[in-house]
Amino acid sequence: MCKKILFYVAIIVLLVVFIYQSIASCCSVYAQEPEIKYKQQLGSKGSENGQFRTPHSLAVDPFGNIYVGDTGNKRIEKFYPNGTYQASWGSAGSNNGQFLGLHDVTVDPEGKFVYSLELNNHRVQKFDSNGKFITKWGFNGTGGRDVQRSPHQIAVNSMGIVYLTDRNGNQILKFFPNGTFMETIGSKGAGPGQFDGPHGIAIDSGNDNVYVTDMKNHRVQVFDSNDSFIRQWGSFGNSTGQFSKTAPGIALDIKTTIMSTL
């Protein structure tokens, strides 16, 4: 009888230990997962201050100010870090400070300048952080395809050098801060440093490494500040680290955690 009681007690103890370890392990796993919570939103549909019509791009400066490319309203809107409307500039047209086909907006690492990229006007415009027009430039004289260039996204490094992804030319275009053309990076292909539909681009402000989404090659490529290929990741598929569709956008946080959009 005693042996039978001891046997059941042992079974109960083992079950308790097993359940405790399972719960502890579960809690440990979930504790390591990043907690993502909804924080806030800004904007609504319309044309008034703080409203949007088909917003297409967004940038945040070092001070937390938010810049939105309000494509449908042909303007850039600026918000305080808490989402309160601050200012806007732009209208429909091809003159300085106007927009047609506003596709991307970015801010330099110091938050001094705002850059816009337009598909229809086929140009880059540069403004100060309050929206005052500074300069503009197109893509003639960039070699090869020139007027067939089709830049889609824009990024700026710590030296003020401007990078554009050119989907038609399968290259990266580089410009000095004043808009003077510097050089191109890459060519069409699937090898390291080559592209097939480059689209998203982001630059690590710490070391000026350049991250590019190479859409049709289903990968991300990384280059150093001297334009040398460093590494790549991604392939076609549905598994972790793969891309089943094109990856048009990419962003880096302050710790250089990479986030891409499908």
Image: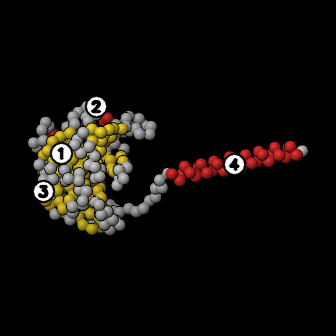
SS class of the residue under badge 3?
strand
2 or 3: mark nearer the eye = 2
SS class of the residue under badge 4?
helix
Task: Name the image quarter holding the N terminus.
Answer: top right
Nearest the viewer among 245 and 259 is 259
Per the model, the C-alpha gap separating discs 3 and 4 is: 70 Å
Q: Mark 1, residues whose alpha carbon is within 10 Å: few (<14), some, or many (≥20)?
A: many
Which amino acid type is shown beneath numbered disc 3?
Answer: Thr
Q: Earlier in the sequence, mark 2 or mark 4?
A: 4
Which residue position is annotated with label 4?
17
Q: Residue at x 81, y 43 (%)?
A: 7
Nearest the viewer among 199 and 227 is 227
Q: Earlier in the sequence, mark 3 or mark 4?
A: 4
Task: Name the image quarter holding the C terminus.
Answer: top left
Which residue position is annotated with label 2?
191
Q: Which mark is residue 135?
A: 3
